[in-house]
Image: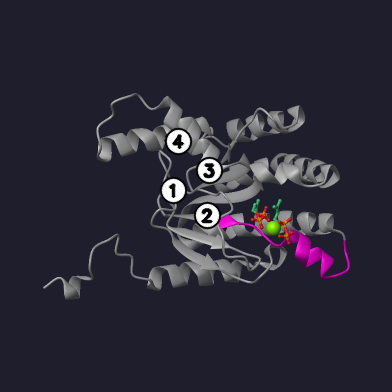
């Protein structure tokens, strides 16, 4: 399989606020999840035009199993429906889909849809779309650490080796890629166990906008703000370097 990563920045989004959006309108939380799935479609279509090469979406955390079983069941059905309905569009638009996270606890029908979607979209090169389901960054780091050979020296080679392990334990492709821009909708300002290693130098962008109402223009605004920021990675600005 050609594992080339599409060019462009890596944007990760914590898609939060579905429930509050719905209850705020007098609807059930589930209506928020249904509306949220429509937002996913719009944002995926907009992403390549914003210079995004990899888009990682947080859809369901390992801790989300603690929600009421009816909500969990609906979310699992929605993920499956989304995958089945989007495959053809993704193939047409050059989107390669990858579901990251644990696979041993999700329903069998969803697992089949995941395998099919990944296989059908494997040649997409315009956008790598990674959807995190049953995902916990801390668990992933622990599982990767357990596979790290003893006595690895410090330094970049070990770091790259670890990034490859980290990706592989969650069914990713190649080395886990650093996040350039992390967006969280819904107003909370926390990571909720998402991509802790990959966000080491990510620019953080929090918006009060709830996920169902997050529009393509909001994504463009976030990416524009990202480009206006100065990333220093521990160094000093050129002008100050003397
Ligand atoms: C995010 O929206 C979707 C999932 C976690 C599955 P929430 O369901 O967390 O919505 P709020 O935060 O309760 O509004
Ligand atoms: C994080 O949102 C997970 C997803 C968006 C999928 P939560 O709503 O579960 O996070 P907390 O509980 O507010 O931290
Ligand atoms: Mg939430």
Query: Magenta stretch containing residue 203, yes or no?
Result: no
Q: Position of residue 236 (x, y in %)?
A: 22, 68
Q: Position of residue 65 (x, y in %)?
A: 73, 42
Residue at the (51%, 56%) spot, across then down: 48
Q: Position of residue 112 (x, y in %)?
A: 70, 28
Q: Which residues are magenta?
A: 12-27
Query: Magenta stretch containing residue 24, yes or no?
Result: yes
Q: Quick one: label 4 or label 1, which is nearer the N terminus?
A: 4
Q: Disc 2 marks which residue? A: 12
Q: Quick one: label 2 or label 1, which is nearer the N terminus?
A: 2
* Secondary structure found at label 1: loop
Q: Is the residue at mark 2 in contact range of ligand 2, meaning its CB lies under 8 Å from it? A: no
Q: Quick one: label 2 or label 4, which is nearer the N terminus?
A: 2
Q: Measure the alpha-carbon separation of dots 3 and 4.
A: 9 Å
Q: Is residue 155 left or right of residue 148?
A: left
Within 10 Å of the Cα at label 1, are there few (<14), some (14-19), or many (20+) other Cα atoms? some
Q: Are marks 2 and 1 in contact (CB under 8 Å)?
A: yes
- Is residue 65 shown to the viewer in this render? yes
Q: Disc 3 marks which residue? A: 137
* Secondary structure found at label 3: helix
Image quarter of the N terminus: top left
Within 10 Å of the Cα at label 2, are there few (<14), some (14-19), or many (20+) other Cα atoms? many
Q: Are marks 3 and 4 in contact (CB under 8 Å)?
A: no
* Secondary structure found at label 4: helix
User: What label sits on residue 166 in the rendered view?
Assistant: 4
Kindly report which numbered mark, 3 or 4, lies closer to the viewer in this rendering: 3
Q: Are marks 2 and 4 in contact (CB under 8 Å)?
A: no
Kindly report which numbered mark, 2 or 4, lies closer to the viewer in this rendering: 4
Q: Quick one: label 3 or label 2, which is nearer the N terminus?
A: 2
User: What label sits on residue 198 in the rendered view?
Assistant: 1
């Amino acid at each position: 399989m050609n594992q080339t990563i599409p060019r462009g920045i890596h944007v990760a989004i914590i898609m939060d606020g579905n429930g509050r959006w719905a209850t705020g309108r007098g609807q059930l939380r589930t209506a928020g999840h249904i509306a949220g799935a429509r937002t996913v479609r719009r944002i995926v279509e907009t992403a390549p035009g914003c210079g995004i090469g990899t888009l990682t979406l947080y859809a369901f955390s390992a801790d989300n199993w603690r929600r009421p079983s009816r909500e969990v069941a609906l979310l699992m059905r929605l993920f499956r429906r989304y995958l089945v309905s989007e495959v053809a569009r993704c193939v047409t638009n050059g989107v390669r889909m990858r579901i990251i996270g644990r696979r041993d606890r999700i329903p069998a029908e969803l697992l089949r849809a995941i395998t099919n979607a990944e296989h059908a979209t494997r040649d997409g090169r315009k956008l790598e779309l990674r959807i995190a389901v049953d995902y916990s960054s801390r668990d992933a780091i622990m599982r990767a650490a357990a596979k790290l050979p003893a006595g690895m020296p410090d330094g970049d080679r070990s770091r790259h080796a670890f990034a490859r392990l980290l990706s592989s334990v969650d069914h990713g492709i190649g080395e886990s890629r650093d996040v350039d821009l992390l967006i969280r909708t819904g107003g909370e300002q926390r990571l909720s166990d998402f991509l802790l290693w990959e966000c080491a130098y990510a620019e953080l962008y929090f918006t009060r906008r709830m996920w169902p109402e997050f529009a393509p223009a909001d994504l463009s605004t976030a990416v524009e703000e990202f480009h206006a920021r100065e990333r220093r990675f521990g160094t000093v600005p050129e002008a100050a370097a003397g």
